[in-house]
Image (spheres, rainbow, N blue to C red):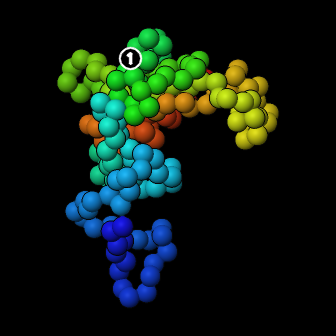
């Protein structure tokens, strides 16, 4: 794993680490997922993953629009790009469209669906009716060209659009 550089000789808390300006090789190239609290974001294209560091930034919400999309469109996108090559039981699907080149181009999909058991929803959200007021985010696929941290903005927009 690349060393995280801290200023001074005393180790800094994780919240104060200084990352090198040059992107180093990722320390987890042999796994398909990392914890969501990581400073790295995962991207997908052609069912192969890549990683982007949050420090890259660059996401401009004015370039994008989130819209409810038909399941067939979401399914085609997910099957083409997600590593699993499968599509979950879906209730709602949202597309992230990039308008920066003048026309809408689908560059991400969020699929919300039914988990294996209702407890997945009722344990963290006991006051919400499962499958009606709460769903599981089953797939979240962003193309490589989506700047970091597009997944945060895209998921927030999808959540606000569905309410």
Tell which of 117 and 20 is nearer to you.
117
Quarter where residue 62 is shown: top left
On-image quarter of the N terminus: bottom left
- Residue 56 is left or right of residue 13, and the answer is left
At x 38%, y 88%, the residue is 9
Percent position (x, y) of residue 43?
35, 40
Residue under the point 70% across and 36% down: 120
Residue placed under numbered mark 1 in the picture: 76
Residue 99, horizontal then vertical, whole percent: 27, 24
Name above or below for residue 115 compared with residue 35. above
| Whole-percent x, y for residue 159 in the image | 55, 29
- Identify the residue at horizontal 44%, vertical 11% (top origin): 72
Q: Position of residue 151 (x, y in %)?
A: 43, 39
Point out the image quarter for the C terminus. top right
Which residue occupies 72% across, 41% down? 124
Please tell me which residue lies in front, 63 or 2. Answer: 2
Quadrant location of residue 126? top right
**Label 1 crowd (10 A; few <14 / some 14-19 / many >=20):** few
Q: Is residue 119 above or below residue 11?
A: above
- Residue furthest to the right in view is 127
Q: Is residue 64 visible?
A: no
Q: Is residue 55 above or below residue 147?
A: below
């Amino acid at each position: 794993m690349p060393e995280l550089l801290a200023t001074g000789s005393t180790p800094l808390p994780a919240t104060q680490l200084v990352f090198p300006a040059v992107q180093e090789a990722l320390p987890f190239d042999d796994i398909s997922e990392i914890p969501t609290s990581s400073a790295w974001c995962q991207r997908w294209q052609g069912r192969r993953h890549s990683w982007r560091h949050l420090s890259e930034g660059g996401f401009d919400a004015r370039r994008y629009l989130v819209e409810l999309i038909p399941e067939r469109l979401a399914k085609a996108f997910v099957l083409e790009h997600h590593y699993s090559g499968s599509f979950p039981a879906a209730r709602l699907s949202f597309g992230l469209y990039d308008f920066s080149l003048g026309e809408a181009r689908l560059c991400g999909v969020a699929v919300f669906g039914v988990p294996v058991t209702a407890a997945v929803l009722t344990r963290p959200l006991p006051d919400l009716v499962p499958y009606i007021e709460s769903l599981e985010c089953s797939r979240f696929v962003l193309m490589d060209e989506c700047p970091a941290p597009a997944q945060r903005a895209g998921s927030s927009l999808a959540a606000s659009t569905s309410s």
